[in-house]
Image: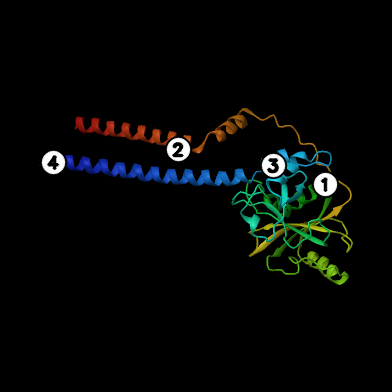
Amino acid sequence: MKKAAKFIVRIIDHMVNLTALLLILMVMFLSCYMLWDSNQVYQAADARNYEAYIPTEKNTKSFEELRKINPDILGWIRVNETNINYPLLQAEDDDTYMNTDAEGNYSLSGAIFLHCVNNPDFSDFNTMIYGHHMEKHKMFGDVGMFTDKTYFDEHPYGNLFFDGKDHGVEFYALIQADAYNERIFTVCPDDPDAKQEYLQEIEKNVLNKRELTLTQEDHLVLLITCTSEMTNGRNILVGRLTDQVYPEKEKPKNLGTGIDKLKEKMTQVPMICWLILLIIVLLIIDVKMRKRGKKKHENN
C-alpha cells in the first residue's frame, strides 16, 4: 500500500510540475507575443522607414517614387531636432490614415495626414495636421514633449515641403484643447472677424508660447495629437508658415559604447529565437529538478 501511495504521490507531483511548467510557458509565450506585436507597431511607425524618400528642392526623385506608390502623399513635414519627419498625406476623409500607413498598407500607427477639408496648398487660415500620439518618439509622440517649457523654447522651427519646395514653420504656441472644441477644429472662413475669434481661442487654450505676434494675414499650421492629461484632450502645436526656411542643426555623431552596440545587436535577434531559448532553459531546469527529486526519493 505504501509503495502504491508513493507512486500515486509521485505521479500527482509530476503532473503538478508539468501543469505549472505549461502555465509558465503559456504566460511567457503570450507576453513575448505581445511584446513582439507591440514592437512591430513601433517599427512600422519609425520615421527612418521613409528616410530614402525625404525630398529636397533640388532632388525630388525619391519623393516622386513614393508618390507613385501612394498618390495621396502631398508633401513632407518635419519638426526640427525631433523625430517628427514624415510624409504628409490627405484623403477624402479623416478616417483612412488613422490605420493606414504612407504606403497604403494597414497599420495601427497610421500616417501623418492633412484634415480632409483643408486645401492642400495651405492657403487656408488654419491648416490642421493629425498624427497618433505614440511612445518611443514615433509619429506625433514628440508633440507632447512641447508641454515642457524648456523643450518648447529649444524647438522653435519646422519645415513643410509642398508644391515642390520647402516652406518654413515658426512655432508660436503649444495649446491643449478639448476634441469637441468646434472653434479650434473647424477650418476658419476667410473673414476678418472669424480669424480674430480663432486667434483669441488659441490664446484661451495656451499652455506655452513665445513672443510672436500672429496676424490675420498669417497661414497657421496646427499639429494635433491626443493627450491623456485631460478628458478628450488634444495637444496642439501651433505654428505659422514663413518664407524663410529653417534648416536642422547638424546632429552630433554618437559613437556609442560597447553596451549600446550589444543592446542594438540583441534587439536585432527575432523574438521567436529568445522564446525558443527561454523554453529550452526552462526544460533543462525542469529535467534537473526531476533528477534531483528522484535522487532524494532513492536515498529515502
Q: Residue 115 has which mark?
A: none
Q: CA distance from mark 3 to mark 2?
A: 30 Å
Image x and y of residue 255, in percent: 69, 29
* Residue 144 makes an appearance in the image: yes
Q: Quick check: marks 2 and 1 in contact, CB under 8 Å? A: no
Q: Residue 164 has which mark?
A: 1
Which element carries disc 2, helix, strand or loop? helix
Mark 1 is surrounded, within 10 Å at the Cα level, by few (under 14), some (14 to 19) or many (20 or more) other residues, namely some
Mark 3 is surrounded, within 10 Å at the Cα level, by few (under 14), some (14 to 19) or many (20 or more) other residues, namely some
Residue type, mark 2 in image = Leu
Q: Give the number of the mark in front: 3 or 2.
A: 3
Within the image, what quadrant is residue 118 found in?
A: bottom right
Q: Give the number of the mark in front: 1 or 4.
A: 1
In which quadrant will I find the N terminus?
top left
Residue type, mark 1 in image = Gly
Q: Give the number of the mark in front: 3 or 4.
A: 3
Image x and y of residue 161, in percent: 80, 48
- Quick one: label 2 or label 1, which is nearer the N terminus? 1
Which residue matches tag 4?
A: 4
Q: CA distance from mark 4 to mark 2?
A: 39 Å
Q: Residue 50 has which mark?
A: 3
Image x and y of residue 71, in percent: 71, 50
Q: CA distance from mark 1 to mark 4?
A: 86 Å
Residue type, mark 3 in image = Tyr
Q: Residue 275 has which mark?
A: 2
Residue at position x 38%, y 44% from top?
A: 24
- Quick one: label 3 or label 4, which is nearer the N terminus? 4
Residue at position x 77%, y 65% from top?
A: 187
Which element carries disc 4, helix, strand or loop? helix
Q: CA distance from mark 2 to mark 1?
A: 48 Å
